[in-house]
Amino acid sequence: MRNDQGIVKASAPAVIVAYAVAPGDVVAAGDTLVTVEAMKMELRIVSPFAGTVQRLCGLANVQVNTGDPLVQIEPTSEVAPVDGSERIQFEVDGGAETVVVGRMQALTELKSLLLGFDVDPTASKRIARMLAEVSQHDSDQTVELEAFEDEILATFVDVCSLFSHQPAVEVPIGGDLLMGEQYLLTYLRTMNADDAALPAEFVQNLKNALDHYGVASLDRSARLSEALFWVFKAHERNAQQIEPITSLLSSCLRRAELDPGMIERRSRKLLDRLIAVTQGLSPSLSDLAREIR
């Protein structure tokens, strides 16, 4: 992920392992910039365009959150972005299962798509295909994958809740998610979370969504404004998100046939919220969530 200042950012929480570049280095699209560790796997973050490294924005062995800057690059005059599928590359021990690696890559790319970040427009179907694969994993891999999958679903739910449109008769599960977009527009007019017109439930939903962008405060700031921009970009790409989320849930159901305990490990509260926000958005997705619940 990058912004107009050429800053390459973290697309998910991770720990910086090592930088592969230094200020002044000239890089081409696809060159490795930094290696990070997430979910006990090393990921190489590569340059999305050619340019000159201006500064390193982090330190080795330091935790970064979603949206934190990693490297600032001055682009060359003719920028040729690298294809989205090459932006993150995984390195794992030789014994790791190919399906596990592919699933981790797909989930990482899906999170970027859900947050509205720059992703290859054709990535949605490719991510869906990768998530459709099902295999048995060892216990450590299972726990890590399920935790990451829940994080992905929470990202989808938290952002969607800010734009949710549902009939008033459907209140029981979703609560104040029903008027999410109306409340969001009210907030944007004043940028005041203490506005009496905003229910506490909406404010909490807003905090939940912004937390995925590494924004912890609703106080007016440049970082808050940027996060809100990406929230709207994510909403614009909602249609591209349905297929990979559907594929994710479908694979969870198929895995439950191999591991019946998987259903019990899932967060019922998260699934309830997923059912609520997808009732009007995608009834088939809502039905899938009900089956898992």
Image: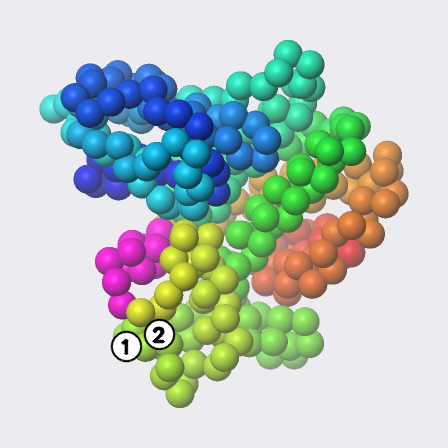
Report the quarter where the C terminus lies: bottom right
Which residue appears farthest toward the top when viewing the image?
94
Amino acid type shown at disc 1: Thr
On the image, numbered disc 2 is attached to which residue?
187
188 vs 249: above or below: below
Report the quarter where the N terminus lies: top left
Q: Name the image quarter holding residue 52.
A: top left
Give coordinates of residue 193: x percent, y percent: 37, 76
> Which residue appears at 55% of the width and 71% of the height?
177
Which residue appears farthest toward the left when viewing the image?
77
175 vs 223: above or below: below
Q: Is residue 224 magenta?
A: yes
Amino acid type shown at disc 2: Tyr
**41 relative position to 114: left or right:** right
Callout 1 touching callout 2 (CB < 8 Å): yes
| Crowd around label 1: few <14 · some 14–19 · many ≥20 (10 Å) | few
> Which residue appears at 86% of the width and 34% of the height?
258
In depth, the one of 156 and 285 nearer the eye is: 156
In depth, the one of 224 and 229 nearer the eye is: 224
| Crowd around label 2: few <14 · some 14–19 · many ≥20 (10 Å) | some
